Amino acid sequence: SIGNGSKKILLWSQMHGNERTGTKSIFDLLIFFKKECPIANHIVSQCTIHIIPILNPDGAEMYSRLNANKIDLNRDAVKRIAVESQLLRKELDKFKPDFCFNLHDQRTIFGVSGTDKPATISFLAPSENRLRTITKSRKKTMNVIAAMNAILQKFIPNHVGRYTDEFYPTATGDNFQKLGYSTVLIESGHFPEDYEREVARKYTFLSLLSGIQHIADFSVYDKFEAYFDIPDNSKNFRDLVYRFKNKKDQVFQYEEVLEQGEIKFIPIKVKGNISDFIFHKEIVFVN
């Protein structure tokens, strides 16, 4: 817990154990608050922030999306079978935050529509129903996301996307939004030559800091239209292509595997029309 202000923020990461960038960024945020600079001092005077750095520690240890009982915590918001889901909901009900931040990693397949850039950061204001109604809670979420995007565009222009707002009835963000808790979803993605996601980590931290500062600075969050200026994500990237002179090119997507405590990237051959894709890496065979 950080701060003693009246604006309450609940922040959690690693619902999926193999999505660790947000957790690293949370520790960066904690280090920033220890500096007691003017921005940090202002935030802690205006906000109280509760943080769950790793919601799925078993999944983190196994480098698995699921928890130890093979449950996807981000699809367990209604039944709440998992003890981790129960813990998160208990904290939500007790704390009653004004805003939530839900941190995830997204796959390297995502790019920013209308550009040739990978989506390094993607945002989402989750929907509350299948009609994707723009409710009061979603407007507040969109307002904060628009402020975060405005900052990121100064550093990584055209590397920010908007994740699909398709409604998922059992998802955490969708249900928290439905309950009236404005929930910002951050997806940390790929930056060129950044498979360790250290660049994405930096901009996830910047997203968190700028979003929380925006909440601290304002009391009305009703302007939301700029959220829709953020381009949609597109699934137009693949990790690797082998280009041959005399035979068909081959496309690969990396599978991340934990081996003896080390994350390894295993290329898996995938199908698809090569002309539809942008590649993070190309290897050309001259013979």
Image (cartoon, grey):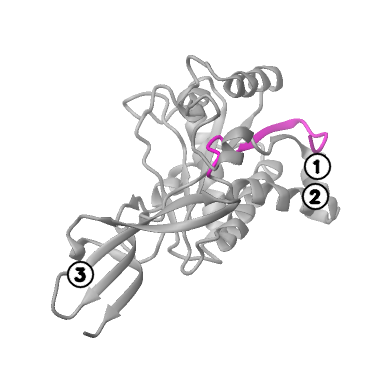
The amino acid sitting under disc 2 is Phe
Q: Is residue 123 above or below residue 264?
A: above
Q: In this view, does 241 lie above or below 165?
A: below
- Under circle 3, the secondary element is loop
Q: Is residue 12 above or below residue 170?
A: below
Query: Residue 6 versus residue 111: which sits nearer the camera?
Result: 111
Q: Name the residue under label 3.
A: 249
Image quarter in which the N terminus is found: top right
- Circle 2 packing at 10 Å, graded few (<14), some (14-19), many (20+), is some
Identity of the residue drawn at 65% across and 21% down: 87
* Residue span colored magenta: 1-18
Q: Mark 1 points at which residue?
A: 44
Structural distance between the alpha carbons of marks 1 and 3: 54 Å
Q: Can residue 69 be seen in this view?
A: yes
Residue 13 sits inside the magenta stretch: yes
Q: Would you identify the image quadrant in which residue 167 lies? A: top left
Task: Residue 126: give x, y in percent of width and height.
Answer: 45, 33
Residue 242 is left or right of residue 3, and the answer is left
